[in-house]
Image: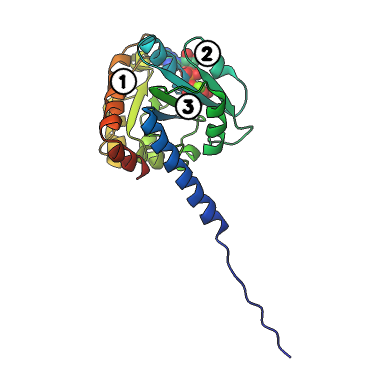
Amino acid sequence: MTTTTSTRTIAVNQDIQAQKKRRAAELRTSFAERGTFVVNLVSSPGAGKTSLLEATAKYWQGRRSMAVLVGDLATERDAERLRPFVPVEQLTTGGACHLELSLVERGLERLPDEDYEFLFIENIGNLVCPASHDLAEHLRVVLMSTTEGDDKPGKYPKMFRTSGAVVVSKSDLLPHVPFSVDAALADARLIQPDLRAFTVCSLSGEGIGDWCDYLDDARQRMLTSPQQVIEHAEK
Ligand SMILES: Nc1nc2c(ncn2[C@@H]2O[C@H](COP(=O)(O)OP(=O)(O)OP(=O)(O)O)[C@@H](O)[C@H]2O)c(=O)[nH]1
Ligand SMILES: [Mg+2]
């Protein structure tokens, strides 16, 4: 007697990814309805994400409401730096190289429940893994510091392809390091021609006004044409 066995493939991974995508879309819409513009800040380690957030918070103090979720593998150090200026919660991954939406949701529960104008999520310092994780943001911004070389966009294309803006940080060091802003931006725009670009020094505040004006305009666009901004973020 012969027996036949039949196999059935269950696409568990696909299902989980679809679930995460749906949840990110729901949250993005709900943030837009509350008037909160969400920015996911990504870069290599030490490029200046927390410093940019400190400078942004100081520039806007008393004029805009913002909150921050800050990700690291360990420690509360970045949250401690930002706490004098804004509501902030530290997310620690315990070793994972990127933030997941579920961790962001847990952080949101710990933040005071207010309709902030801006929510910034500082991702783990890494130009690879965070590119593949939607955190319900309306805008992804990639930082590139002048000390890390101007050849990074072509080497980490997904991060630049999925970002809407690039911030060149540590501009005060330009006279001392071999970094061409033009070359870096040309390389980035080969990958993402519509990238908006800003050059800043978070320590002196140079360029922070232009960066904040851009964020104000981006939030205004979300308030007037939410669907357009949401669809663009989901592409
Ligand atoms: N010269 C100069 N140094 C800066 C500037 N911005 C940040 N730094 C320095 O760069 C170092 C790293 O800055 P952080 O803001 O901690 O960078 P980060 O991207 O948040 O780092 P991780 O969270 O560890 O990935 C710190 O010593 C900052 O003082 C800048 O505009 N100019
Ligand atoms: Mg940081």
**Viewer-proximal residue among 40 and 47:** 40
| Colouring chosen for the image of the structure | rainbow
The C terminus, quarter of image: top left
Judge the density around disc 3: few (<14), some (14-19), many (≥20) Cα neighbours within 10 Å: many
For mark 2, give the secondary structure. loop
Q: Measured from the top left, where is residue 27 in percent x and y?
A: 44, 37
Residue, far bottom? 1
Reading the image, the residue beneath label 1 is: 211
Residue at 39 percent across and 15 percent down: it is 56
Asked if the residue at label 2 sits under 8 Å from ligand 2, the reply is no
Q: Quadrant of residue 194?
A: top left
Q: Measured from the top left, where is residue 45 in percent x and y?
A: 50, 27
Asked if the residue at label 3 sits under 8 Å from ligand 2, the reply is yes
Mark 3 or mark 2: which is in front? Answer: 2
Q: Earlier in the sequence, mark 3 or mark 2?
A: 2
Q: Measured from the top left, where is residue 180 in percent x and y?
A: 30, 25
For mark 3, give the secondary structure. strand
Reading the image, the residue beneath label 2 is: 83
Judge the density around disc 1: few (<14), some (14-19), many (≥20) Cα neighbours within 10 Å: some
The N terminus, quarter of image: bottom right
Give the residue type that dot 3 points to: Glu
Q: Is residue 108 left or right of residue 179?
A: right
Residue 122: mark: 3
Judge the density around disc 2: few (<14), some (14-19), many (≥20) Cα neighbours within 10 Å: some
Q: Earlier in the sequence, mark 3 or mark 1?
A: 3
Q: Measured from the top left, where is residue 99 in percent x and y?
A: 53, 35
Residue 19: mark: none
Q: Earlier in the sequence, mark 1 or mark 2?
A: 2
Q: Whole-Å distance between the Cαs marked 3 and 1?
A: 16 Å
For mark 1, give the secondary structure. helix
Q: Is residue 164 above or below residue 23?
A: above
